[in-house]
Image (cartoon, rainbow, N blue to C red):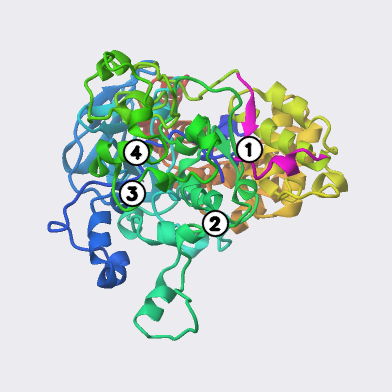
């Protein structure tokens, strides 16, 4: 999995950022994993559920009230509201007809079209915008808009916008962002975006109509493919014995039942896919090793919005009951609100008889929680905290860390990470313990914790954890150790790319170049490793090598501006202003809302004596950001103002 790509602009082609196309997934999801609460009588059964409804009408009708059934989709009602980013001073506003506007403090303006939603609206709705070119036409690139709608509270800055100066209209919607909201393969806007299913690049180039084409979650999300089961039940095909055509989840061991939910409810600080996992339904028995997640090694009072299994694993009732699964408490086809607090109390009573409660009868639920009881027994009220997640202010939800005594609900300041300065560990429910205790397992664990440290902005710690691994560029660096029982890091191109980022941040350029080369030896189409490899070659003065990387990237992903930026820098370094201008023009066509690209293009065109073309490019830069350094002088030189 990858973080949203850092779009490297010509002046910053090699700037390192921890959000730069890394292989770890972001965890601050902006919307609920479910959907709105339609009634069976008001919403038609979606096509993905029609066949299931023939035999399971009651279950399907109940599921249609569950948030999962509306996990994403087109805009039903255009949002409204506005917000200001406190650090950058940017103003954001929804307008008529689905327009969204970003207004810079210097008067620069960008617009996008609201084309979809992610999240059900039970807690929160994230909005998706389509990037527009200077003529107002969608380019096919999708962005999380920096303003969300908190149910009951209205417009609010999105989580990614609360960190520092925010991302503005630079937080891309990628296949990795969508994987918990749809099981459909990511759409491609054209065959020219590459045919390798491992990469969509640029990763946000999904098409302005993607949210209309993608299906929300259905039965397949938990049960796996249902076609063969339907064929057997309707006698379109025949099978011997008790073959149902799918696996009953209750027939799986408890840990594997939890894995079905963990695919989306174990985000951690970061996670990485080392071996294929199923997009839905039962997972491989070694799921936690195939998709290891890094979580804080020490418990915190606060919790993340999408961290249910991570928090549940801290609970004494979980540690003492290995047979516990998510459905020990949750009815799988009903949303939590519809299921009701009394139902959860009844689940507690199956293991903890009501009479065993140690609460003094004189002690009211309000004394424990600060709020009125929601049920007669009060089990959930007293032992499951309802509070604000640290990564999504202005709402409240359940902290799945079940405790004898819970902290009172609190509104905490936003932060990105659960324990920014604390140690990380690979999440383990006991299945990885033996493998992690071996020499190979300790090496695997150190490699993953290093990449987690990078995610938390601690590159020195990451470099120290990677220090004892075989040196980049050696055959051993790409060879799993003997006796390895876990999916290897050594054969994972993403791992080597991230190792390159760590080494580059540490100032070890030669080692970083070798690490990027390791990634490319394993996967020549790895786009981010190719960009960073070419950027380092250019930094070292190897223009031919940089141009070769740019050409390869273009052959795989012709819709990417990154290769054109690299080509432009190499051409400019070689003194070929014409070739550099042509490359920057191609870059601006692919990423038209980058003022730095337009300004640099204008300067190159001025140097070539093409004042009219230069003026046109500089005016686009001025519309996007008129206060850019030197832009007024550039416009004057081109005969504009």
**In the figure, 308 relative to 417: above or below?**
below
Q: Position of residue 28 (x, y in %)?
A: 44, 33
Please say whether residue 433 is one of the residues in the magenta stretch: yes
Q: Earlier in the sequence, mark 1 or mark 2?
A: 2
Please say whether residue 556 is one of the residues in the magenta stretch: no
Give the numbered dot on residue 569.
Answer: 1
Whether residue 396 is visible, yes or no, is no
Residue 369 sits in which quadrant?
top left
Asked if the residues shown at circle 3 and circle 4 are in contact, with their CB atoms under 8 angstroms apart, the answer is: no
Q: Nearer the viewer, mark 1 or mark 2?
A: 2
Q: Which residues are magenta?
A: 422-438
Distance from disc 1 to disc 2, alpha carbons, whole Å, reads 46 Å
Q: Residue at x 32, y 16 (%)?
A: 360
Mark 2 lies on residue: 283
Q: Position of residue 247 (x, y in %)?
A: 48, 65
Q: Residue at x 35, y 16 (%)?
A: 408
Q: Earlier in the sequence, mark 3 or mark 2?
A: 2
Query: Could you tell me which secondary element the residue under label 1 belongs to?
Result: helix
Mark 3 lies on residue: 331
Mark 4: few/some/many CA within 10 Å (<14, 14-19, 20+): many
Most foreground residue, 481 or 622: 481
Mark 4 lies on residue: 31
Distance from disc 4 to disc 1, alpha carbons, whole Å, reads 39 Å
Mark 2: few/some/many CA within 10 Å (<14, 14-19, 20+): many
Asked if the residues shown at circle 4 and circle 2 are in contact, with their CB atoms under 8 angstroms apart, the answer is: no
């Amino acid at each position: 999995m990858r973080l949203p790509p850092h779009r490297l602009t010509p002046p910053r082609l090699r700037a390192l950022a921890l959000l730069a196309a890394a292989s770890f997934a972001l965890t601050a999801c902006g919307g609920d994993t479910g959907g709105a609460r339609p009634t069976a009588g008001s919403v038609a059964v979606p096509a993905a559920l029609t066949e299931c409804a023939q035999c399971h009408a009651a279950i399907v009708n109940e599921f249609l009230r569950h948030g999962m059934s509306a996990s994403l989709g087109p805009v039903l009602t255009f949002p409204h509201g506005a917000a200001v980013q406190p650090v950058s001073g940017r103003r954001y506003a929804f307008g008529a007809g689905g327009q969204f506007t970003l207004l810079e403090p210097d008067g620069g303006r960008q617009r996008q079209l609201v084309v979809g939603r992610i999240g059900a609206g039970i807690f929160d709705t994230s909005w998706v915008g389509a990037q527009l070119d200077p003529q107002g036409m969608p380019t096919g690139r999708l962005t999380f808009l920096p303003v969300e709608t908190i149910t009951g509270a209205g417009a609010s800055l999105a989580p990614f916008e609360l960190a520092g100066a925010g991302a503005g209209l630079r937080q891309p919607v990628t296949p990795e962002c969508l994987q918990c909201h749809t099981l459909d393969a990511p759409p491609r806007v054209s065959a020219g975006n590459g045919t390798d299913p491992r990469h969509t690049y640029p990763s946000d180039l999904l098409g302005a109509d993607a949210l209309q084409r993608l299906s929300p979650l259905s039965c397949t999300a938990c049960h796996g493919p249902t076609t063969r089961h339907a064929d057997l039940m309707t006698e379109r095909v025949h099978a011997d014995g008790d073959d149902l055509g799918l696996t009953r989840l209750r027939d799986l061991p408890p840990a594997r039942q939890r894995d079905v939910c963990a695919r989306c409810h174990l985000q951690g600080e970061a996670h990485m896919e080392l071996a294929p996992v199923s997009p839905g339904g039962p997972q491989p028995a070694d799921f936690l090793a195939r998709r290891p997640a890094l979580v804080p090694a020490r418990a915190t009072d606060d919790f993340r919005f999408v961290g249910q299994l991570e928090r549940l694993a801290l609970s004494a009732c979980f540690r003492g009951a290995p047979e516990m699964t998510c459905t020990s408490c949750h009815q799988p086809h009903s949303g939590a609100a519809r299921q009701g607090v009394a139902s959860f109390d009844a689940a507690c009573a199956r293991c903890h008889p009501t009479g065993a409660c140690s609460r003094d009868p004189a002690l009211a639920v309000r004394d424990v929680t600060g709020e009125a009881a929601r049920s007669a027994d009060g089990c959930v009220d007293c032992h499951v905290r309802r509070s604000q997640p640290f990564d999504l202010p202005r709402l409240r939800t359940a902290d799945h860390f079940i405790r004898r005594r819970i902290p009172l609900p609190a509104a905490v300041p936003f932060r990105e990470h659960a324990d920014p300065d604390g140690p990380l560990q690979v999440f383990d429910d006991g299945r990885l313990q033996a493998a992690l205790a071996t020499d190979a397992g300790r090496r695997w664990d150190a490699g993953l914790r290093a990449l987690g440290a990078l995610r938390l902005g601690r590159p020195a710690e990451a470099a120290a954890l990677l220090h004892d691994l075989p040196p980049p560029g050696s055959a051993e660096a790409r060879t799993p150790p003997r006796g390895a029982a876990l999916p290897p890091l050594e054969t994972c191109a993403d791992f080597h790319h991230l190792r390159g980022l760590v080494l580059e941040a540490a100032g070890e350029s030669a080692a970083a170049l070798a690490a990027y080369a390791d990634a490319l030896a394993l996967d020549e189409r790895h786009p981010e490793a190719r960009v960073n490899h070419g950027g380092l070659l250019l930094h070292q003065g190897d223009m031919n090598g940089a141009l070769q990387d740019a050409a390869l990237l273009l052959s795989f992903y012709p819709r990417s501006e990154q290769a054109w930026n690299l080509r432009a820098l190499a051409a400019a370094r070689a003194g070929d202003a014409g070739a550099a201008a042509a490359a920057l023009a191609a870059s601006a066509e692919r990423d038209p809302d980058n003022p730095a690209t337009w300004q640099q293009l204008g300067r190159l065109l001025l140097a070539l004596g093409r004042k009219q073309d230069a003026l046109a490019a500089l005016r686009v830069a001025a519309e996007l950001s008129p206060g850019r350094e030197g832009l007024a002088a550039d416009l004057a030189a081109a005969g504009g103002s």
